[in-house]
């Protein structure tokens, strides 16, 4: 009983539940992860199941790792045998083990969202597109088509099913408008089928395939499904409100025999519907499992009662599409902690700039009263909404950590590498060669470089051509001897790396540039927090190069330069690195990223939006 002695009565009932379906409605801050991990530990300790007979799934690798670590503390040396993973990681492992049954090679490759868009772009004219490939802008609808395909997979709609639906629309169409709508649907259905064929031919899968192909495998190979049903006698699911239709289908297939399915979730915390989450899964759980036991966790260990009461009043606006309304259960949270003073403050400002400045001043006050910077959080709706507040923090010297940093390609150290690649592969590209010359790698004099660039533009010459003339000993404009030597060095380096690129791939050439130019050494001497971040950004850029090399047959530096253009065209804007530090700083993040985190003081900003 040691596993349940520190649990409240509702948590204890959930942990001690025997067999059969169980729906745990866990409000925010009620200890749902604690309940799941204790239930896993209880099943193992009581010998109801061996560790390898338990499957627990959640949505992020971080959450899965945390769950595994907690189980290992409760029942040492067993968590490594239990299957604790994300839906997608589980699906990919199944596909690797049964690749031949699925019709894929075991070494198939997973495309991320950007690679998926590039793959679609490169195969655009192999697809039966008409309306969705306008002559003036053939790439215009790529993202919309991919979004439609993702949604179809999440909803467990196969290409042939969608084609039948579209054909039915065409047969029932009674006017030109309805006929046009049917033709559009049929075009998307054909593209969906052709896209899947292209993926399979090249041994590629996308993110949604990690679950969709497993469901398809289980339907076509009943013996394989039965093997997994016997293997996993207990299945537990965290954040069930964020599952989509096909993920629930997978769970129902696995639990069809024993029905030992425990799901933990809260419809009031469903924030990922834009990613395909289906709220109907948790709302309809009792309809599919009428015998399911229902346990509601309402003891909150995170917030004071005024905050909980205000949240409850707000969420009532979602009725009648809530479990509380549908099943007549009481979900009002009760605080386990007591706070003194006022918990909620509403501040009003006439402009966004005034709000941001006042926020920075208030954060400074709270810090002076004894709160650590890291115990303060600023929650924004979107990453782009943080800019005004970050500027105010910079002006008032408030240290902050922004989790939504984007724009890897706009970082100085990465811009240098991109400029090098373009200067090496396109001798007519004067802009990038000019940037490279002025960078910390070569440090050419700005005045002389402006004169050289001005001469090149006036004479309608490329900067590369003028550099060649200077390297050969004749400068068309008067420049300092030091600048002349720098230009000669740049031109010699370009010739050397062009020669190196003949027999080496993009990654080898870029790394050679970092080494031979001394840029890498300069970045790490001395090693500071700033240089640590810059090195990590370069590593992220090399991840892009590696992804490119894995995706194509020709991974030359010239081919990678074209790939960079494609990345920009499909809107790739990867996150920059963040230093792994314990530095005390205010946390600035989106509401979505804040889910499950705790801070002493929280500011919800820009609520007018």
Image: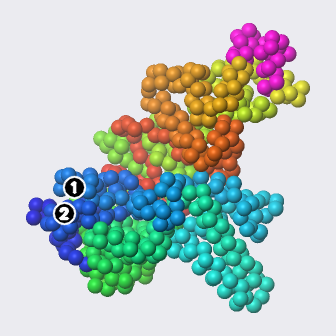
| Residue 265 magenta | no
Q: Nearer the viewer, residue 107 or 12?
A: 107
Q: Which residue is mark 2?
A: 44
* In magenta stretch: residue 472: yes
Q: Position of residue 569 (x, y in %)?
A: 69, 50
Q: Main secondary structure of the magenta part?
A: helix
Query: In terms of secondary structure, where does tag 1 sit?
Result: loop
Q: Does 437 appear above or below 70?
A: above
Residue 218 visible here? yes
Look at the image and tell me whether residue 314 can be seen: no
**Mark count:** 2
Q: Secondary structure at mark 2?
A: helix
Is the residue marked by circle 2 packed among few (<14), some (14-19), or many (20+) residues within 10 Å? Answer: many
Q: Quick one: 573 or 517, which is closer to the camera? A: 517
The answer to whether the residues at label 2 and label 1 have Cβ atoms under 8 Å apart is yes
Residue range highlighted in magenta: 463-490
Say whether residue 593 is left or right of residue 183. Answer: left
Q: Which residue is mark 1?
A: 78
User: For this view, does 429 lie left or right of residue 211?
Assistant: right
From the viewer's side, name the closer residue of 574 and 315: 574
Tell me the residue at 71%/19% (across/down).
492
Left or right: residue 175 compared with residue 274: right
Residue at image position (46%, 40%) is: 578
Residue 324, image x and y in percent? 35, 79
């Amino acid at each position: 009983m040691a596993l349940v002695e520190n649990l409240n009565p509702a948590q204890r009932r959930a942990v001690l539940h025997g067999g059969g379906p169980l729906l745990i409605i866990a409000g925010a801050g009620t200890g749902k992860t604690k309940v799941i991990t204790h239930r896993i530990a209880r099943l193992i300790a009581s010998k109801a199941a061996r560790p390898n007979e338990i499957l627990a799934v959640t949505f992020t690798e971080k959450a899965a790792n945390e769950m595994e670590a907690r189980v290992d503390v409760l029942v040492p040396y067993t968590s490594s045998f239990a299957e604790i993973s994300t839906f997608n990681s589980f699906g990919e492992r199944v596909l690797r083990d049964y690749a031949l049954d699925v019709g894929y090679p075991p070494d198939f490759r997973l495309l991320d969202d950007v690679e998926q868009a590039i793959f679609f772009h490169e195969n655009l004219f192999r697809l039966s597109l008409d309306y969705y490939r306008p002559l003036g802008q053939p790439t215009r609808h790529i993202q919309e088509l991919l979004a439609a395909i993702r949604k179809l997979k999440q909803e467990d709609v196969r290409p042939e099913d969608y084609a039948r639906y579209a054909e039915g629309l065409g047969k029932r169409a009674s006017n030109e408008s309805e006929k046009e709508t049917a033709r559009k649907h049929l075009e998307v259905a054909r593209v969906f089928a052709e896209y899947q064929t292209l993926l399979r031919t090249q041994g590629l899968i996308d993110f949604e395939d990690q679950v969709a192909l497993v469901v398809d495998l289980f339907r076509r190979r009943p013996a394989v499904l039965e093997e997994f049903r016997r293997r996993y006698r207990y299945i537990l699911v965290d954040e069930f409100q964020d599952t989509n239709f096909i993920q629930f289908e997978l769970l129902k297939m696995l639990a069809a025999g024993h029905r030992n399915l425990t799901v933990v979730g809260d419809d009031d915390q469903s924030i990922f519907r834009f990613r395909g989450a289906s709220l109907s899964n948790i709302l309809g759980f009792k309809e599919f499992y009428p015998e399911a036991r229902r346990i509601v966790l309402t003891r909150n260990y995170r917030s004071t009662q005024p905050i909980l009461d205000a949240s409850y009043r707000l969420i009532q606006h979602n009725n009648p599409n809530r479990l509380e309304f549908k099943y007549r259960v009481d979900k009002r949270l009760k605080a386990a902690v007591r706070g003194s003073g006022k918990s909620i403050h509403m501040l009003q400002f006439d402009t966004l700039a005034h709000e941001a400045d006042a926020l920075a001043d208030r954060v400074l006050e709270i810090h002076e009263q004894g709160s650590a910077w890291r115990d303060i959080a600023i929650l924004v709706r979107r990453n782009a909404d943080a800019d005004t507040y970050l500027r105010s923090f910079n002006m008032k010297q408030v240290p902050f950590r922004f989790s939504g940093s984007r724009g890897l390609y706009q970082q100085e150290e990465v811009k240098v590498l991109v400029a090098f690649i373009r200067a090496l592969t396109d001798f007519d590209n004067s802009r990038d060669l000019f940037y490279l010359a002025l960078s910390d790698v070569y440090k050419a004099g700005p005045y002389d470089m402006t004169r050289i660039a001005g001469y090149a533009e006036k004479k309608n010459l490329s900067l590369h051509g003028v550099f060649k003339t200077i390297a050969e000993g004749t400068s068309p404009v008067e420049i300092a001897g030091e600048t002349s030597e720098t230009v000669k060095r740049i031109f010699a380096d370009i010739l050397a790396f062009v020669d190196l690129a003949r027999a080496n791939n993009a990654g080898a050439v870029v790394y050679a540039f970092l080494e031979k130019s001394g840029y890498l050494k300069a970045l790490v001497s001395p090693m500071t927090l700033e240089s640590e971040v810059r090195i990590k950004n370069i590593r992220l850029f090399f991840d892009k190069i590696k992804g490119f090399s894995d995706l194509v047959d020709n991974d030359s530096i010239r081919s990678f330069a074209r790939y960079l253009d494609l990345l920009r065209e499909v809107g790739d804007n990867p996150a920059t690195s963040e230093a792994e530090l314990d530095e005390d700083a205010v946390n600035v993040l989106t509401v979505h990223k804040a889910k499950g985190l705790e801070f002493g003081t929280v500011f919800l900003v820009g609520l007018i939006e």
